[in-house]
Image (spheres, rainbow, N blue to C red):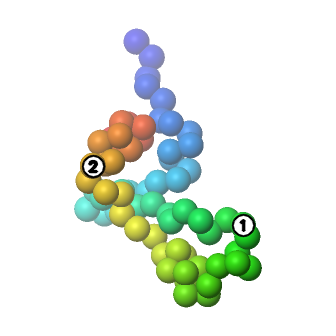
Amino acid sequence: MPKVKTHSGAKKRFALTAKGKIKRKHAFKNHMLDKKQTKQKRRLTHTALVHKSDKGRIEKLLRI
């Protein structure tokens, strides 16, 4: 039986922390940034953790 491949889109978007949590980036930081306030853009720069309700789906894509 062949190996199961990791989802290519997921491996580009998510990263694992040392404790096994999954990091993600915030949405809405791609284009039309002149309309958004500086404070909002600054908050969106930082990474966040995937919510526990979504963790199972992401792990399945990453084949953890």
Dividing the picture into quarters, in which one does residue 21 lie? Answer: bottom left
Instruction: Give 3 or 34, whichever is nearer the viewer.
Output: 34
Indicate whether 14 appears above or below 49.
above
Query: For the view shown, which residue lies furthest in the bottom direction?
Result: 39
Q: Specify which label sits upstream in the sequence, 2 or 1.
A: 1
Query: What residue did someone put label 1 on?
Result: 31
The residue drawn where x is 45% and y is 70% is 47
Q: CA distance from mark 2 to mark 1?
A: 28 Å
Q: Residues within 10 Å of mark 1 (few under 14, many from 20)?
A: few
Image quadrant holding the N terminus, namely: top left
Q: Residue 57: where, in percent of width, then height? A: 35, 40
The residue drawn where x is 31% and y is 57% is 51
Dividing the picture into quarters, in which one does residue 27 lie? Answer: bottom right
Query: What residue did someone put label 2 on?
Result: 53
Q: Residue 30: where, in percent of width, then height? A: 67, 65
Q: Is residue 32 left or right of residue 39?
A: right
Q: Residues within 10 Å of mark 2 (few under 14, many from 20)?
A: few
Q: Residue 64: where, in percent of width, then height? A: 33, 41
Residue type (three-letter) at the residue carrying disc 2: Ser
